[in-house]
Amino acid sequence: MVILYDRFNLSEDIFEIIFSTSQQIIVAKELIKYILENKGEISKTEMSLFATKLHDGEYETTLENEPYKGRKAKLSYNKRQFYDRILTPMKSMGLINYDLYKKTYKISRQFSNDLMKIGLMWKQWLETQGFAE
């Protein structure tokens, strides 16, 4: 997944930087909230139940984003698109980790670690080019 951002107009919300539509932002936040409510880890079956509830339009939540803040709503999101546009990018960026042995999904700090590593790589490359600030 590619993240394009304007550092002069950087959102305060990490989800708005990562995801391109408001619907994706809402669903991604709900997924993280769901995992946190389950002590930071859910099984493959629980993930499937979450995706199915979304697909069937049975997932209920109180929205946090303006202009719908505080309203209760039933969310609907296609199951295949959930896996393709929400879960898979979150796994590949290191926001969520999947343990193949335990078959569980966990919230991960790898995203933060990778961004720090990328920043260091940029600094090192500049130094090899003779750029000194």
Image (cartoon, helix red, strand yellow):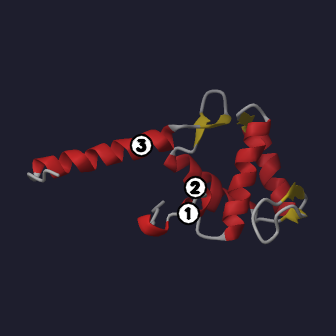
Amino acid type at mark 2: Ile
Q: Give how far across and how far down residue 91 sits, in percent.
A: 56, 47
Q: Nearer the viewer, mark 2 or mark 1?
A: 1
Label 1 sits on what residue type?
Ser
Residue at mark 1: 11
Foreground: 60 or 88? 60
Q: Could one spot residue 6 in this view of the protein? A: no
Asked if the residue at tag 1 contacts the one at tag 2, i.e. Cβ–Cβ closer than 8 Å, the answer is yes
Mark 1 or mark 3: which comes first in sequence? 1
89 lies left or right of 123: right
Tag 2: Cα neighbours inside 10 Å, few (<14), some, or many (≥20)? few
Q: What residue sits right under mark 3 in the picture?
A: 114
Label 2 – label 1 distance at C-alpha: 7 Å
Amino acid at dot 3:
Asp
Instruction: Give the residue pinned by disc 2.
Output: 14
Instruction: Work out whether 91 lies above or below 97.
Output: below
- Indicate left or right for 51 with 2 as reference: right
In percent of the image, x 48 and y 42: which residue is there? 112
Helix, strand or loop at label 1? It is loop
| Residue found 62% across the figure and 62% down from its top | 85
* 68 shown above or below 63: below
Residue 11 image point, x, y percent? 56, 63
State which quadrant residue 58 falls in: bottom right
Residue sitting at the far left = 130
Nearest to viewer (mark 2 / mark 3):
2
In whole angstroms, how far apart are the C-alphas of marks 2 and 3? 15 Å
Q: Which residue is at a point 61% across and 58% down the rendered structure image?
A: 13
